[in-house]
């Protein structure tokens, strides 16, 4: 068990094999309290597999995962969420027909174990509604809080996905490509919101947008072929010849 109180999420020798293919290769990762930690690498580097291992979507072949010093390697995804490891997911069909306010009330109610009575008239639980309204304000959704989610602009949907994740009170938030597919005109609002995520929440960012990565992250891990190539501060990574060669494409016409 980890004894460093500053480390909130840690992987030890994490391996994932699919038949003869090693998708995750002996990954040792430490995420500090309040970190802004980016995972980058070329397509096929194993970023998604690693996130799926950490969240419990995939079982590890070898190694273990610790959250706040507790071994969570064998826990189901929902048990990891309960303990504070939360990932942004694309909005599913259930939420499409609800408004952002209804969605957040439902998620907060479920997370707090208040039963499945979220469809009761809004205002039954004032604390839940107050928290939902705080999140709507934080994520710039107050102007669309009563619109059905299926009618929201794409950027607003991505903001709602982050609000849903924050409603689960994460200790560690895994942000999976938050600006992917967002039109240029909606990106600024999204980027500003990402920059203002709560300081006490450790954020792991998986993102292809290098401008976002280098503006957001205080630490970057580079994955290549399922293994950690290197890790360091943004400036170190930007100047690393290995990274330039395999990721940024230096040396290629």
Image (cartoon, rainbow, N blue to C red):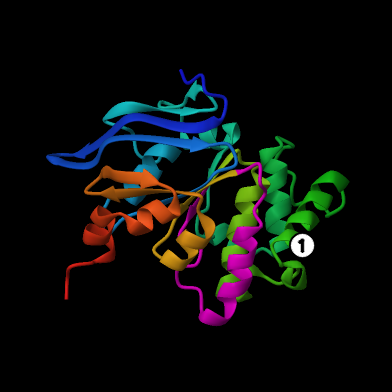
Total numbered badges shown on the rendered structure: 1
Q: Nearer the viewer, residue 133 or 191?
A: 191
The spot of residue 169 in percent (x, y) is: 66, 41
Report which residue position mark 1 lands on. 137
Which span is picked out in magenta? 174-201
Q: Taking 129 as reference, is 72 left or right?
A: left
The spot of residue 48 in percent (x, y) is: 35, 50
Please give the name of the residue rendered at 87% of the width and 47% of the height, measured from the top-left corner.
126
Q: Identify the secondary structure beneath mark 1.
A: helix
Residue 93, magenta (yes or no): no
Q: Which quadrant of the structure image shows residue 59?
A: top left
The spot of residue 150 in percent (x, y) is: 59, 71
The quarter of the image holding the C terminus is bottom left
For the question of whether residue 238 can be seen, the reply is yes
Please give the name of the residue rendered at 71% of the width and 67% of the height, measured from the top-left corner.
140
Please give the name of the residue rendered at 67% of the width and 40% of the height, measured from the top-left corner.
111
- Identify the residue at the far left of this view: 20
With respect to residue 101, does 74 lie above or below?
above
With respect to residue 60, does 174 lie above or below?
below
């Amino acid at each position: 068990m980890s004894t460093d109180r500053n480390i909130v999420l840690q992987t030890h020798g994490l391996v994932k094999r699919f038949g003869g293919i090693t998708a995750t290769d002996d990954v040792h990762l430490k995420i500090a309290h309040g970190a802004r930690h980016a995972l980058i690498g070329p397509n096929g580097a194993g970023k998604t597999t690693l996130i799926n291992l950490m969240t419990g979507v995939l079982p590890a072949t070898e190694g273990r995962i610790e959250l706040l010093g507790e071994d969570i390697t064998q826990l189901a995804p929902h048990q990891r969420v309960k303990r504070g490891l939360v990932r942004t997911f694309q909005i599913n069909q259930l939420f499409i027909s609800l408004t952002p306010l209804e969605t957040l009330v439902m998620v907060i109610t479920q997370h707090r174990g208040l039963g499945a009575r979220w469809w009761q008239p809004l205002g039954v639980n004032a604390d839940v509604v107050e928290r939902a309204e705080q999140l709507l304000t934080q994520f710039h959704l107050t102007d669309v809080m009563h619109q059905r989610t299926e009618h929201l602009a794409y950027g607003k949907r991505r903001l709602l996905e982050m609000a849903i994740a924050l409603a689960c009170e994460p200790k560690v938030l895994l942000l999976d490509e938050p600006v992917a597919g967002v039109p240029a005109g909606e990106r600024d609002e999204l980027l500003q919101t990402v920059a203002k995520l709560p300081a006490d929440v450790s954020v792991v960012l998986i993102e292809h947008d290098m401008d976002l990565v280098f503006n957001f992250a205080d630490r970057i891990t580079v994955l290549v072929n399922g293994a950690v190539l290197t890790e360091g501060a943004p400036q170190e990574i930007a100047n690393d010849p290995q990274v330039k060669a395999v990721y940024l494409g230096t040396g290629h016409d």
